[in-house]
Amino acid sequence: MKTLFKFITFTMCCCISFAAVYSEQKFDKLIIAEAWIRQPIANNPVTSGYMTISNSGTTDKTLMSITAKFAKKSQLHETFIDGDTMKMRSLKNGILIPAGETVYLKPGSHHIMFMKFAQHLKHLESKNVTLIFKTGHSVTVKMTVKPVHMEMSSHSH
């Protein structure tokens, strides 16, 4: 009986931990999931954020910008190859989330850049980030701070 109790307790803790790292939020026909922030290395004043946004609606949505109290500056970025060099640039026109499709903000692709931290980012801490859409609507999502080595356990698409 003690073994069964320990197993159930362990399983519940794992599920709670998984939910804290991989929560899902619904907003205006969008499902926002797997939202996480790369834990900055040493005193680096810049880091990136990632998530999956699925549009179950019949109209396209555009993520225009983000805000986060822990960073003095936040931008939507894309990574691209220019010759032999990988570069990043800010997306002034936002990120399109087509109707019926999923967009992955992930390393090496579209992502969020957080710059000049107002607060230290701690391992597995949740930070609120507000997503602002072209319609003017916004939603605040919780993003979990994860070290670089944990990103490999995330889903890759």
Image: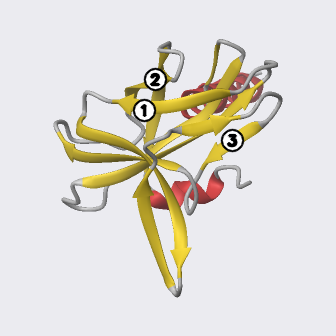
- Give the residue type that dot 1 points to: Ser
Q: Position of residue 149 (x, y in %)?
A: 51, 61
In what element is the residue under mark 1?
A: strand
- Give the residue type that dot 2 points to: Ile
| Marks 2 and 3, the one that precedes in the sequence | 3
Q: Residue 103, labelled with which disc?
A: 3
Depth check, front residue: 37 or 77: 77
Q: Residue 65, labelled with which disc?
A: 1
Mark 2 and mark 1 in contact? Answer it, CB < 8 Å: yes
How far apart, in angstroms, are the residues tagged by discs 2 and 1?
A: 5 Å
How far apart, in angstroms, are the residues tagged by discs 2 and 3?
A: 16 Å
Q: Quadrant of residue 75?
A: top left
Q: Quadrant of residue 112?
A: top left
Whether residue 109 appears in this view of the structure is yes
Query: 54 left or right of 39?
Result: right
Q: Position of residue 131 (x, y in %)?
A: 46, 25
Disc 2 residue crowd, few under 14, some 14–19, many 20+, Cα 10 Å: some
- Give the residue type that dot 3 points to: Val
Q: Position of residue 126 (x, y in %)?
A: 40, 29
> What is the total number of numbered labels drawn onto the structure image?
3
Q: Nearer the viewer, mark 1 or mark 3?
A: 1
Above or below — where is 129 with respect to 118? above
For disc 2, the marked residue is 132
Above or below — where is 4 with respect to 98? above
Disc 3 residue crowd, few under 14, some 14–19, many 20+, Cα 10 Å: some
For image coordinates 46% across by 23% down, the residue present is 132
In what element is the residue under mark 3?
A: strand
